[in-house]
Amino acid sequence: MDRAGATFWTRRRRGWVAGGLTALVLAAAVAVEYQRIGGHDREALVLLRSPQDEARKLGAWLVAREHAPAALQYIADTLDKQSETDAAVRESFVYALGRAGDPRFTEHAARVVREDPDAYARQAAWVAAARLDAARFRALAAEIPPQPDPWDQLGRACAWLELGDLRGLDTLLDAAVAEDEQQRRVAALALYRGVAPLLEAAGRWPIQYVVHEGQPWPAEVVAEVRRRAAELDLTALAADTRRHVAKAALVRRNVWRLHHTRDRLAAYLFRR
């Protein structure tokens, strides 16, 4: 073989090697991604199918946190079949659907609003419907008359607040000082996320008080927030600041994901 031919075949072999390495790298990347997604689905499905109520709730929270499409569909199917007997688990199921952000799951949440016998599950379904599809939530709210149960009222108020609508503010403030501790927690969380930022943006948050996400508010804080909110046009303020609040929430979410990914990588790389 002459030199030109040898050079040709050498280059050809190098090309094959480079192409093969590229294919291996791509295949490995696909496999890692498949394992990541599949792993979340598998882990969540094991929990969701557990006979233990707490395990099924953990599965729903895992689905809410991670992209697990098969597990999400399992949750939606379970709600449709009405085969989940524990109301707290059903509440966690509709919460997971709401966090999915996929409008295809709106009707599943709406079915819980219409048919679930437990008001605690229904309140979560109201919020999920608002998160999944604002227009269909509004139609649902027009379809179903307000109910006397405090949980239904609280669910509607939280759902409207998700859309920047303050029509349920008095309901939230009343629930924040209710006798039921869980209602106080739900109301305080909604106020923390949807009302406190508006007061802060207007420079009207009472700086002498410190509140924490997920914790009930003292009665004096609720009373002061009620007084200050009455002095402001919070609806107009919400319309002006909503897109900025949404961007800030996205930044906080991405920061959490980065920290979570860092911790998982550190655990994987340095595990003994």
Image (spheres, rainbow, N blue to C red):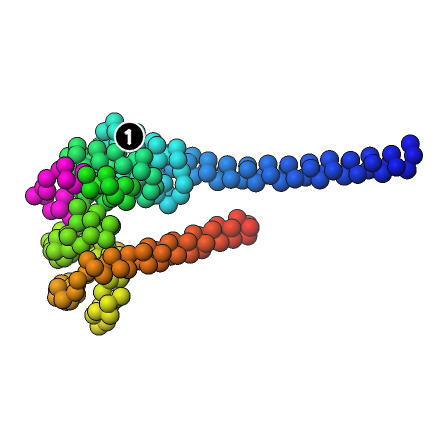
- Taking the image as shown, residue 77 lies to the left or right of residue 224, namely right
Which residue is located at x 25 percent, y 27 percent? 81
Please say whether residue 184 is visible from this viewpoint.
no
Q: Position of residue 262 (x, y in %)?
A: 49, 54
Q: For numbered disc 1, what is the local secondary structure?
A: helix
| Vertical side of 227 occupied by 235: above or below | above
Which residue is located at x 48 percent, y 40 percent? 36
Residue extending farthest to the left is: 148
- Taking the image as shown, residue 128 lies to the left or right of residue 6, namely left
Residue extending farthest to the top is: 81
The disc labelled 1 sits on which kind of residue?
Thr
Task: Name the residue tied to disc 1.
Answer: 78
Q: Position of residue 123 (x, y in %)?
A: 19, 43
Q: Position of residue 241 (x, y in %)?
A: 28, 60
Residue extending farthest to the bottom is: 208
Q: Position of residue 173 (x, y in %)?
A: 14, 57
- Taking the image as shown, residue 55 lies to the left or right of residue 34, namely left
In the image, 267 versus 98, the foreground residue is 98
Query: Magenta stretch: residue 149 in it?
Result: yes
| Vertical side of 101 occupied by 46: above or below | above
Residue extending farthest to the right is: 2
Which quadrant of the figure has residue 13?
top right
Look at the image and tell me in which quarter the N terminus lies: top right
In the image, 106 versus 173, the foreground residue is 106
In the image, 11 versus 123, the foreground residue is 11
Which residue is located at x 68 percent, y 39 percent? 21
Magenta residues: mostly which secondary structure? helix
Region in magenta: 140-154
